[in-house]
Amino acid sequence: MWWIYALLSAFFAALTAILAKVGIKGVNSDLATAIRTSVILFITWGIAIFRGGTATVTTLSKHNLLFLGLSGIATGLSWVFYFKALQIGKVSQVAPVDKLSVALAIVLSVIFLGESLTWKDAIGAALIVVGTLILIL
């Protein structure tokens, strides 16, 4: 079941790049990121409230809040740079480079989370890097 959600995520991420490229024309990329983030904020809080996800907000630890906050900062910075790249580059080049995050996440998960790196993971990450280089060169 997880892979269905992952495929939906990939589909909407691809759609995001196309819609953003059209919407960012003639707009400051920082303003575009702020507008996008505001929409996301409204939608995600609506979903959390509607599905009862806010019922446990008081049980969050400082550790949870710290790392969710840091994740939010990383997401925000990713979006700022992504929108700037989309503004001046081609979607067909920006999107693949952005997806290098998959290979980077594999490496970082080994370094910081102690996850094991299988040959399958290593080959997959290497193929992502090679594929990205082919697409951007």
Image (tube, grey):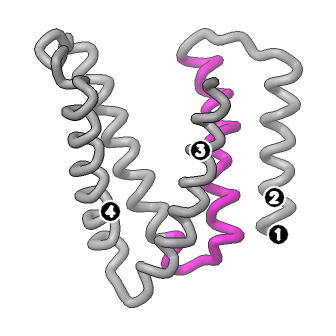
Q: Please give the residue where the numbered disc 4 appears in the rendered image.
A: 36
Check contact, mark 2 vs mark 1: CB within 8 A: yes
Please report whichever mark, 4 or 1, sits nearer to the chain's N-terminal start.
Answer: 4
For label 4, the crowd category at 10 Å Cα-Cα, with few meaning under 14, some 14 to 19 and many 20 or more, is few
- Where does residue 129 sit, x and y in percent of width and height? 79, 47
Task: Count up the numbered dots.
Answer: 4
Magenta portion: prevailing SS class: helix
> Left or right of 9: which side holds 120?
right
The disc, 2 or 4, on the residue closer to the chain's N-terminal end is 4
Taking the magenta stretch, the answer to whether it contains residue 91 is: yes
**Residue 73 % position (x, y):** 31, 42
Residue 89: quadrant of the picture:
bottom right
**Disc 1 from disc 3: Cα separation:** 28 Å
Q: CA distance from mark 4 to mark 1?
A: 30 Å
* First in sequence: mark 3 vs mark 2: 3
In the image, what residue type sits under mark 3?
Leu
- Disc sitting over residue 8 in the figure: 3
Q: Secondary structure at mark 2?
A: helix
Residue behind mark 1 = 137
Up-down relation of residue 109 to residue 70 (above or below): above
Q: Does label 1 or label 3 sit earlier along the sequence? A: 3
The residue type indicated by label 1 comes to Leu
Q: Nearer the viewer, mark 1 or mark 3?
A: 3
Name the mark on residue 133. 2
Badge 2, how many Cα within 10 Å: few under 14, some, many 20+? some
Please report whichever mark, 4 or 3, sits nearer to the chain's N-terminal start. 3
